[in-house]
Image (cartoon, rainbow, N blue to C red):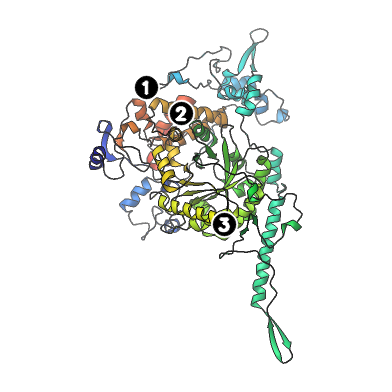
Amino acid sequence: MSDATAQSSTRFPPGTAPIKAEYLISFEPCAIPDDDAAEGSTNPISSTAPTSLPSGEGGGGGGGKKLSKRNKKKKERGQNKGRRFQKVREDVDLCWRIARGTVCEFGENCRQSHDVPAYLSSKPQDLSIPPISSLSISPPFVEPTPSRTDTRHPSLDLNTICPVFAALGECRYALKCRFLGGHVKVVEKEGSASELELVVDEEKRARAVSTEEEINKVDGEALKKVRTKKYPTPIADAYTKELQATADSKERDAQNKAKPSVMEDGDAVVIAEPEQEDQPPVDAEGDVLMKGKEAVHAYDPSQADTPDVRARFEEKKRLRWEGKSYLAPLTTTGNLPFRRLCVSLGADITCGEMGLALSFLQGSKEEWSLVRRHPDEKIFGVQLAGSKPNLLVSTTEILAREFGSSGGLDFVDLNCGCPVDLVFKQGSGSALLDTPARLGKILVGMNRALGEIPLTIKLRTGVKEGKNTVHRIMERASRWGVSSMTLHGRTRQQRYSKLADWDYIKQCVDQVRAKEKDEDLPRIPIFGNGDVFSAQDYYSRVDRYGVDGVMIGRGALIKPWIFTEIAEKREWDISSRERLELIRRYADYGLNHFGSDTAGVNTTRRYLCEALSFQYRYVPIGLLEVLPPRINDRPPAFRGRDELETLLASGDSRDWVKISEMFLGPAPESWSFTPKHKSNTYGSEEAQG
């Protein structure tokens, strides 16, 4: 142990970030958000506790009993339930067709306004994203940009730059854009009248088609067919028939075995065993196995009327992911703007937020928006969750047909690790770990529907604490057609309560590699996941535990620049101004994705505040006595090396809104942000507007 480490250990209790003395405000560790409580209870006791319990926690006693000290703290650190994020509407709701300069087919019957002058007169002042050169480490942190107005159109700022127009050469939000002055010109008319004419940069628009335009946009007609159940899924239909035929055959066998036929042969009574039909090979749990490189089933698919021949495993695109960094699929926070930010900082592989197969098949626009991809994302996949083979295989087939041929989809991932009650109780996510027979059927079917597109899975070590079981599934995954696996080193029940079990991850990797060698199966990439928070963490895991790379979740949320550290093999003592530049970049990406109109600006504001609800937890490494930093260490109260660094470390959600206002303008009075964690809520909801 070094002198610095020894000194630090005597000054701080275990699990406390070792802040240098000159930056300390208090030795008492700060309360940090409880990541488990914020996701909702998954404890089997607490989730079924009587409603009379005051906190929803497990344990004896009725509503009159006082909470234990531990439960009080857990409740205070828990989730703000029932969060609602309302849309902010404009005073005059201008028709989109009129805003874009086209004709509205509804005419006078349109529910929206067609009065452009009235709309422009009520429109608030244009916004302006400050240039990087205007950022400072001292208040007000952002120097205001000089504006240039037109007396006839006072809401316009002719000096502003529209982020959408700057990227695409055209702003699809037209007159409704909050950066309107950046893509209009004032055209003089007779007398003192004038009109606004939208500007289009044809050269930039042509270039943007391949460099900036988001891809994987589902066609409206296709979405209508999905919603009305008219989208053809012949592969899924044929596979469902196979499963049904196999189930019927097993049922007949069971009935025949239960009721053997009895015949008389002279004076003797002969009990005749029923003839056995040829059955597919199954393992001890009844799973259909892969024979060589092909799936074997009781139902012969060659006799079915199927237009497509399924791809054999060797026809799959091989994944060469060794040594790559992988941004985990993150619900809510792992949206396209955040993924773009991480890619710009060095992330190699990205995956969209988890989507529910049932919602995809219901034609949910929100669910289908999760497959959107930016051209910057070099290796991109979609993650699905579900519990029924027919739903997952059908969804997979539609995804492959819509985006496979265009190259918009590099892989599809099946979520076998989500611990959230809502998902688990439906038999999805980590619940699949306890139903390997069903999981095998799902994977074989999805693999067939995907054609040459690889299928991957994300797993946890098991369901119950102390019972690691996933090695049994991982050994068989290749036979089910899986092209890559990621293992999070915790059980579903553990959530984040303990450190990830990397020794068990290594055990699983070793067993899979031995199985591949014994059965002459192709080697597939295996990624580990859990508690990686620095370049040193990343490379030590790869070297010591045999994984091909590491998937990073919480570490990327707290410090997205971890991907730069990994790529450059260094720890980055990032300055507060550099962090503010990244926040500005996120705002720019958000406006391009969510929109530069009033609704898009405040959606961007909401997700920027969600991102800041993790990033404030970063402790600058220049303030630490011992490196590398550890993700689960709680910092004592500290001040930064400058005023901006101190502000960025604030856990007060009102400060996150103030930071958003530096780039997105003042938050409307009707807008508020409710943080995910109770520990970040200060004052009334109105105070956060």
Which is more foreground, mark 1 or mark 3? 3
Q: Which residue is mark 1?
A: 139
How many other residues sit within 10 Å of disc 2, few (<14), some (14-19) or many (≥20)?
some
Q: Amino acid at mark 2?
A: Leu
- Sequence-wise first label, 3 or 2: 3
Quadrant including the C terminus:
top left
Q: Is residue 179 above or below residue 247?
A: above
Instruction: Determine whether the residue tagged by mark 3 lies in a helix, strand or loop.
Output: helix
Residue 89: in sight, yes or no? no
* Residue 116 image offset from top left, x and y in percent: 64, 21
Q: Which residue is mark 3?
A: 519
* Residue 232 image offset from top left, x and y in percent: 72, 48
Quadrant including the N terminus:
top left
Q: Determine the residue positioned at 63% across, 16% down.
A: 196
Of the pair 464 and 485, the residue shown nearer to us: 485
Q: Which residue is mark 2?
A: 582
Of the pair 270 and 220, the residue shown nearer to us: 270
* Residue 152 image offset from top left, x and y in percent: 58, 12
Q: CA distance from mark 1 to mark 3?
A: 65 Å
Q: Is residue 71 above or below residue 584?
A: below
Of the pair 528 and 12, the residue shown nearer to us: 528
Location of residue 387 by image quarter: bottom right
How many other residues sit within 10 Å of disc 3, few (<14), some (14-19) or many (≥20)?
few
Q: Determine the residue positioned at 55% across, 30% down.
A: 600
Instruction: Determine whether the residue tagged by mark 2 lies in a helix, strand or loop.
Output: helix
Contact flag, marks 1 and 3 (Cβ < 8 Å): no
